[in-house]
Image: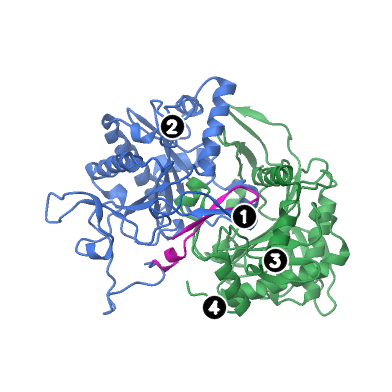
Chain colours: A blue, B green
Amino acid sequence: MPEIRKDPVFGRWVIIASERGLRPNEFSTASDDGNGVYKCPFCPGNEHLTPPTVYSLPAAGGHSWRLRVVRNKYPALVPGGNDGGQSDGIYSRMDGIGTHEVLIENARHGLRLEEMELEAVADVARTFILRTREIKKDPGVKYVMIFKNHGMNAGASLAHPHSQIIALPMIPIRVAEEVAGAEHYLKEKGSCVFCDILKEETGFKNRVVGENGNFLAVEPYASRFSFETWLLPKKHLSHFEDMQEALVWDLASILKNALCKLHATLPDLSYNLIVHTMPVHTPQAAHYHWHIEIMPKLCQVAGFEWGTGFYINTVSPEEAAAMLNEGKKYQL
Amino acid sequence: MPEIRKDPVFGRWVIIASERGLRPNEFSTASDDGNGVYKCPFCPGNEHLTPPTVYSLPAAGGHSWRLRVVRNKYPALVPGGNDGGQSDGIYSRMDGIGTHEVLIENARHGLRLEEMELEAVADVARTFILRTREIKKDPGVKYVMIFKNHGMNAGASLAHPHSQIIALPMIPIRVAEEVAGAEHYLKEKGSCVFCDILKEETGFKNRVVGENGNFLAVEPYASRFSFETWLLPKKHLSHFEDMQEALVWDLASILKNALCKLHATLPDLSYNLIVHTMPVHTPQAAHYHWHIEIMPKLCQVAGFEWGTGFYINTVSPEEAAAMLNEGKKYQL
């Protein structure tokens, strides 16, 4: 059973998951079938290599499925266990309770998310919403974290396109800080900070990299990473899972478009994509506004960033937006 | 001039330093002298490739110096500029004021810090202290951040052993959080959290990886990274730069010993080393206790960690301590 331990200084939580250390890493050592042939556990025909299907969408053509959600074989958190905190000397710990699902985005091994048909990208977005609605039925779940790691530099261990959904038994510290920061802004300025960013960026234009009826894509003013890109819904809504079906197509379209632009400018792109949303089981909030953050990983985060929480970014968001909009290649 | 921008939600600062993007990266593209020969800017004889020397220690033998401090040629922050904040639409920014120094730890290109003689490691520790005392004479400096990136996975761009010293015009958010966390602990429990950790770990023993008269090396209870190692001075002191000369040898010794153990267990070790200390120009504090954190980078930090502030660690600190103490190799 994974264990959650609390740092006594920061109050930061750490998951100690020894079993997860056993997972194969396609990029470093290929796992094989004993005959030296690597079998991707996410490809059709290899379903026996993953835990059973939690959710799937049937394929129109020859394959049995076009999208599939399974429990992670090497989970960071697992259901069951004791949900109370225990002391351990001067420290505190608890069992690593939660769920860890993998969303296999399509049947084709080499097809990147942005290369998929718009309908298939919409399937992925819709599945994020449906799984969150399902997972939050468990009253012990406090937060549902949806994210995607693409490429070796972003921490992906398998190449087959996939995303992850982790249900957590507490509200993560970064989420609490972001929600508190937005609440503070509302108290000071009387408006939602993300609604204000939408207005500012629409007026300024030089950091905008995409727009449709319901979404705006921008390089944020204080980008931590070169080519960091945020996708903001134009209409205020605090909880991602409350998004209406009518918006799913525009979300798929702005996401596909942003990733296409990023790949054109950064051919070897590795990135982390994170859905930022309010904790589940909380009421609609005037101060928080769900959105997606895409963080390309061009270089390693180093000691200065770890020690300070400051970030050093060598490409301004205005330069980044110009390059993305012109389709210009970036030379590292 | 680099620019410091503030994120309107988190209050997080980002340094936008376009010139820094021009720095050479020995690991990806070798810079050469026009004849295709790579010249390390930190090797003796190539002093003209770096800005002038700020501080140095003479060599006993053939070389002109055994340790050298220079301004960073591609600084994240520079002296001068306007120290006031300015608004930029709904956002705020300021000039990127500060200093960014590089400490070249020895004259030999391939000699790692832990392979150096104990006296040379003590020279490095002593220089950290002396430079901090010198840099903090500028009343505009609020924090002095001392760190070292070793290896490509830890964000190092040059192989010649070096550390960095950055003077900042504000207290970084992570430092403020750590100091506030320690202050909260003192109020609740009546003691310094780091003094309590020293007591707990000395009693428990299974996370200790080194000890001498003045220092303890431990794998912390809530290690974020596998084989994370902290070096804690046994005597309470809040400011690193107030450390007495009598402790320098023991610091050098515990540091050399910890790095030797880490390299034996992790042959391809990349790591970030960070000196955690109170902001300069603040009085001695009962709640804060300076220390060093070494964070090996075995794998990439991924979306889950970025989104939550949670960390997933697949090697418990107890297992890590046992492997380090037995000199057992870790298989990734």
Front of the two marks 1 and 4? 1
**The one of A152 and A184 positioned closer to us in this rendering:** A184
Q: Chain of mark 2?
A: A
Q: Which mark is residue A91?
A: 1
Would you call the spot at circle 3 few (<14 residues within 10 Å), some (14-19), or many (20 or more)?
Answer: few
The Cα–Cα distance between marks 2 and 4, rounded to whole angstroms, is: 47 Å
**Element under label 2?**
loop
Label 4: which residue?
B329
Label 3: which residue?
B203
Magenta stretch bounds: A1-23
Q: Chain of mark 3?
A: B
The Cα–Cα distance between marks 1 and 2, rounded to whole angstroms, is: 29 Å
Q: Which amino acid lies under the numbered mark 3 shown in the image of this protein?
A: Gly
Compared to B107, does A71 lie above or below? above
**Element under label 1?**
strand
Q: Position of residue B219 (x, y in %)?
A: 63, 65
Front of the two marks 1 and 2? 1
Front of the two marks 3 and 4? 3
Q: Chain of mark 1?
A: A
Side (left or right) of A267 relative to B159: left
Q: Position of residue A292 (x, y in %)?
A: 41, 39
Residue depicted at x 45% and y 46%: A169
**The one of A331 and B83 positioned closer to us in this rendering:** B83
Disc 2 to disc 3: CB gap under 8 Å: no
Label 2: which residue?
A282
Would you call the spot at circle 4 few (<14 residues within 10 Å), some (14-19), or many (20 or more)?
Answer: some
